[in-house]
Image (cartoon, rainbow, N blue to C red):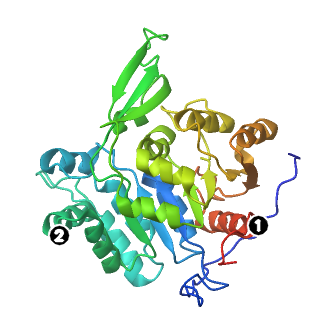
């Protein structure tokens, strides 16, 4: 790969048109791409905030291993899926109008008190209440999305709450060569030492059928950005979901983080992120690896690592101009839009 980077045009909000069907039930020329985004937390929210600007046919598949904060308390007390990452995804899909932004603020609002409600997010309580009322995870999330006017659908990746476990070398600074099992997503995300691998308990969790169907029916699948071991890789640990990712005819984009995460990926180069992902899913091929051009000090090494996964590298300025290590929604939308237009053109939507 040369040192030249593609020119990126800053885009504004693109107004999606409704998906139309041709005579044989296939999307008509010019219809929107079906996009599925996988992840959790702030990384997935960044991706969704960008993707909703370029397509109205968007599904988020969200990790369900969170065990901290309000989500962890509700999970422990009621035995439900942790709702926090699902709530963040719904908030990211809210529109930029008054209705959407008001509801985004409401569901993110946290109570402050000296009692049991302290720290709970309104959206978490709303989601769990509808789960109890309807007895159906997907139906309840669809209803919340309808209330919010969400520009897309949110699904959990598994129908059961998961426990994330990691093998960490040097978790105890006094024993730098010792490998320790660290339990819980909140703990893994901030663990000292070097994460060697992660797995989930139960080991073969059931995937949500609608999530599998969405991946198989997609034109594009976007994985990342986000906490690598606690938000991105867990999707590859759900067997039915991994099989769908391997078998789908969709193009697969891996979106890299802007910087290593303190704790779980301290000192990781961009190419090392690809290497650990490949260790967890050796049969998974990718089509495109997207990275911020300023966050890749060794482009040749990243290109080589991407090639081993069957992918090409796209470099683009996607970081916030204010210098914070966060993605700019419009710049990230421009990068995704260029990738969707220029790579493959396999769908009838182009």
Q: Which residue is mark 2?
A: 134
Judge whether residue 224 can be spotted in this image: no
The residue depicted at 59 percent of the width and 40 percent of the height is: 283
Determine whether label 2 and label 1 are within 8 Å by CB.
Answer: no
How far is mark 2 from mark 1, CA to CA? 43 Å
Q: Looking at the image, is 104 positioned above or below residue 177? A: below
| Number of numbered markers | 2
In front of the other: 72 or 350: 350
Q: Is residue 24 above or below residue 343?
A: below
The residue where tag 1 is placed is 342
Instruction: Name the residue at the left extreme.
Output: 115
* Quadrant in the rendering for residue 306: top right
Picture coordinates of residue 211 (x, y %)? 41, 60
Q: Earlier in the sequence, mark 2 or mark 1?
A: 2
Residue closest to the far front:
24
Report whether 311 appears left or right of 170: right
Residue lying at 70% horizontally and 78% vertically, measured from the top left: 350
Percent x, y of residue 221: 57, 59
């Amino acid at each position: 790969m040369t040192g030249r980077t593609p020119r990126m045009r800053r885009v504004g909000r693109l107004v999606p048109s409704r998906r139309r069907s041709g005579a044989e039930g296939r999307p008509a020329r010019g219809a929107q791409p079906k996009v599925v985004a996988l992840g959790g937390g702030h990384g997935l929210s960044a991706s969704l905030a960008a993707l909703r600007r370029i397509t109205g046919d968007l599904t988020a598949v969200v990790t369900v291993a969170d065990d901290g904060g309000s989500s962890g308390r509700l999970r422990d007390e009621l035995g439900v899926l942790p709702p926090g990452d699902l709530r963040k995804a719904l908030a990211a899909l809210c529109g930029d109008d008054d209705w959407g932004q008001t509801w985004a603020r409401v569901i993110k609002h946290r109570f402050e008190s000296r009692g049991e409600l302290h720290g709970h997010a309104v959206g978490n309580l709303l989601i769990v209440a509808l789960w109890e009322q309807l007895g159906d995870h997907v139906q309840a999330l669809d209803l919340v999305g309808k209330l919010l006017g969400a520009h897309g659908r949110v699904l959990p990746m598994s129908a059961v709450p998961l426990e994330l476990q990691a093998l960490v070398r040097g978790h105890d600074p006094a024993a730098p060569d010792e490998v320790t099992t660290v339990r819980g997503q909140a703990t893994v995300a901030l663990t000292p030492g070097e994460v060697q691998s992660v797995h989930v308990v139960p080991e073969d969790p059931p995937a949500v059928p609608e999530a599998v169907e969405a991946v198989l029916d997609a034109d594009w699948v976007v994985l990342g950005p986000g906490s690598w071991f606690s938000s991105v890789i867990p999707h590859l640990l759900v067997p039915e979901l991994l099989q769908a990712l391997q078998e789908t005819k969709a193009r697969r984009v891996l979106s890299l983080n802007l910087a290593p995460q303190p704790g779980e990926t301290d000192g990781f180069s961009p190419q090392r992120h690809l290497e650990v992902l490949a260790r967890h899913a050796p049969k998974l091929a990718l089509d495109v690896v997207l990275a911020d051009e300023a966050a890749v000090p060794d482009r040749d090494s990243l290109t080589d690592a991407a090639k081993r996964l069957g992918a090409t590298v796209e470099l683009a300025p996607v970081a916030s101009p204010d210098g914070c290590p966060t993605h700019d929604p419009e710049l990230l939308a421009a990068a995704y839009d260029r990738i969707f237009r220029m790579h493959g053109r396999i769908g009838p939507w182009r």
